[in-house]
Image: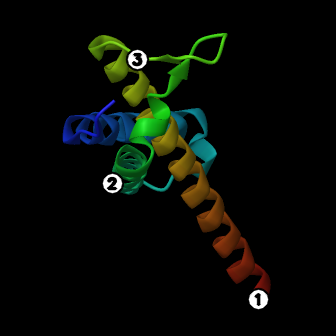
């Protein structure tokens, strides 16, 4: 598979969707729609830039490399971006919660 800016864009959009889906699932850790969007785009973008080839690596049961078709590539890249966006949202939410807890115990 060749590295492509198209798949970076696919993962950017999927990261945005993944971050908002994670925020809906864990509404207790919400930090605003704009914040979720920014974190999702950053998470999806980093995933698209650095993990694009790893996400598309598919092997058969015998260990031979299987080259996915274009539709499969888009699906795999979308899933990778959505997961990266969701994970990034949870990481930022946990950090934000920890900082708030730390500040409240200092007072």
Who comes first in sequence, dot 3 or dot 1? 3
Who comes first in sequence, dot 3 or dot 2? 2
Classify mark 2: helix, strand or loop.
helix
Is 28 left or right of 65, judged from the image as shown? Answer: right
Asked where in the image residue 76 lies, by quadrant, the reply is top left
Of the pair 105 and 70, the residue shown nearer to us: 70
Location of mark 2 (residue): 34
- 3D distance between C-alphas at marks 3 and 2: 37 Å
Q: Give the farthest residue toward the bottom.
A: 107
The answer to whether residue 89 is above or below residue 63 is below
Near mark 3 (Cα within 10 A), the count class, few <14, some 14-19 or many ≥20, is: few
Location of mark 1 (residue): 106
Where residue 15 sits: x, y (%)? 39, 40
Where residue 61 sits: x, y (%)? 66, 10
Q: Give the farthest residue toward the left.
A: 6
Work out which quarter of the rendered image holds the C terminus and state it: bottom right
Who comes first in sequence, dot 2 or dot 1? 2
| Residue at image location 41% in from the left, 51% down from the top | 50
Way the structure is coloured: rainbow
The answer to whether residue 101 is above or below residue 92 is below
Is 49 left or right of 28, judged from the image as shown? Answer: left
Of the pair 105 and 34, the residue shown nearer to us: 34
Where residue 5 sits: x, y (%)? 21, 42
The answer to whether residue 63 is above or below residue 47 is above
Work out which quarter of the rendered image holds the N terminus and state it: top left
- 3D distance between C-alphas at marks 3 and 1: 55 Å
Location of mark 3 (residue): 67
| Residue at image location 36% in from the left, 44% down from the top | 48
| Residue at image location 20% in from the left, 35% down from the top | 6
């Amino acid at each position: 598979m060749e590295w492509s800016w198209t798949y970076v864009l696919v993962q950017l959009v999927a990261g945005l969707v993944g971050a908002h889906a994670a925020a809906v699932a864990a509404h207790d850790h919400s930090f605003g729609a704009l914040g979720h969007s920014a974190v999702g785009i950053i998470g999806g973008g980093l995933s698209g830039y650095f993990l694009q080839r790893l996400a598309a690596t598919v092997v058969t049961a015998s260990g031979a490399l299987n080259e996915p078709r274009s539709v499969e590539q888009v699906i795999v890249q979308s899933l990778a971006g959505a997961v990266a966006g969701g994970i990034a949202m949870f990481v930022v939410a946990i950090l934000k919660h920890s900082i708030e807890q730390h500040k409240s115990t200092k007072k």
